Amino acid sequence: MRTYRELLRTPEFTPLFLTVSAQVAAATVSGLALGVLVYAATGSPLLAALSMFGPSLAQAIGAAALLSAADRLPPRAAMTGVALAFCLGTAALAVPGLPLPGIFAIILGLGLVGSVGGGVRYGLLNEIVPADGYLLGRSLVNMSVGIMQVCGFAAGGVLVSVLSPRGTLLAGAALYLVAAGTARFGLSARAPRAVGRPSVAATWRSNVRLWSSAPRRRVYLALWVPNGLIVGCESLFVPFAPEQAGTLFAFAASGMLAGDVLVGRFVPARWQARLGAALLLLLAAPYLVFAVDPPVPLAVAAVTVASIGYAASLVLQQRLMDLTPAEMSGHALGLHSSGMITMQGVAAALAGTLAQYTSPGTAIAVMAAASVTVTLALARGLSGPARTDPPQGARADIERHGDAGNPAAPPQAGHLAGNTPPATGNR
């Protein structure tokens, strides 16, 4: 599968695509409104960054305790429930007079709910698309993220001016309701990808197995840390240029969209696996210009070029799948999603703290330099042949008898389709 037309003809891909698009639009509009609301009330770059990216911090708890639910809940019901929870939580954030601790309590709760959403969403994508369509499907989903963020930040800036931040939060809640309806009535009922009840013990067993492989650890770190540090840079757009933050966010989303189209659709497969480290360096290096507090036009140009590098997540996710057994692909993607979003929240907190003691521009440059350093440290482990773990049933035999003369089969694309149970920001 090499064209978006083929992909859109795949049954159920379109309703999944529309559900994700509505959720991203809702998150974009409501996140910008909440950041403006908190910054206006407190004048704190740290609290403004945490209000926009704070749910990310709760992903660590969710990844440790709740992630097994991603494969053990019916996908349609889970996606509908997550969207409804965000609808109610976003509407609650719009209540006048809500104290700051109440705002952050709701943000924490939404983060816990959202920790399951990535595994459900991208595990379902694995089930829907053909075996060779995952990277293309993920590319198109990422494109929808970019488009919805461009439109969402542009519309969010207008709505904040016209309706006020609280009115914009209600608009975001309405979009979450649209996402819930699309998931409920557009997707078919499917059985969970794994048997058994969700539990903390099941989550930990799978996390330990995934983390036990050194090649997978390097890919996870490359997916989480350089990306997260740059999202920390983005969390300071409001303090850096309060009147132009929506423009900076919109152009960042435009660059991300361009990178996803270029890498997902036009770069030959034989080159994709070699681009991970280079794209991560592109993601960070242009932000170094913020060290000199650039004028807004130059800042917009740097942000746009840098955001092309977000396409690194496409090729690194493909490598993660090549390194992951078929029966764990859904959990592996959920762990990637939760870890990435957690790191984004940690980086937002760190960036906000640095900005409190220096300036937003200086903090952005420091975070970018850290991202470059981490990428250079991980670069050597992001290419070369990938080898999966043996399936669960064969694992005990290998532990008893060893695997000499019985190497794991070369990675197959078949597990990407999610045909065997169990089968994603935000960047």
Image (tube, rainbow, N blue to C red):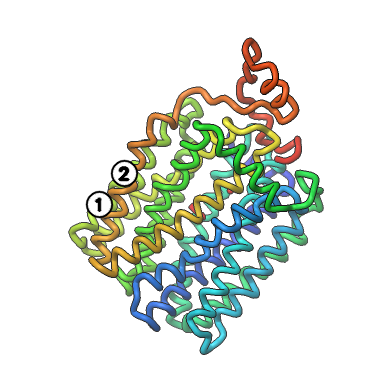
The amino acid type found where label 2 is placed reads Val
Is residue 182 positioned above or below 72 on the image?
A: below
Q: CA distance from mark 2 to mark 1?
A: 10 Å
Dot 1 surroundings within 10 Å: few (below 14), some, or many (20 or more)? many
**Which residue sits at x=33%, y=49%?**
305
Which residue in the protein does label 1 denote?
A: 288
Sequence-wise, the earlier of marks 2 and 1 is: 1
**Which residue sits at x=65%, y=52%?**
67
Is residue 384 positioned above or below 159 on the image?
A: above
The secondary element bearing badge 1 is classed as: helix
Residue 292 or residue 63, whichever sits in front? 63
- The residue lying furthest to the bottom in this view is 97
Residue 399 or residue 417, whichever sits in front? 399
Which residue in the protein does label 2 denote?
A: 372
- Residue 294 found in image quarter: bottom left
- Residue 58 found in image quarter: bottom right
Residue 226 or residue 137, whichever sits in front? 226
The amino acid type found where label 1 is placed reads Leu
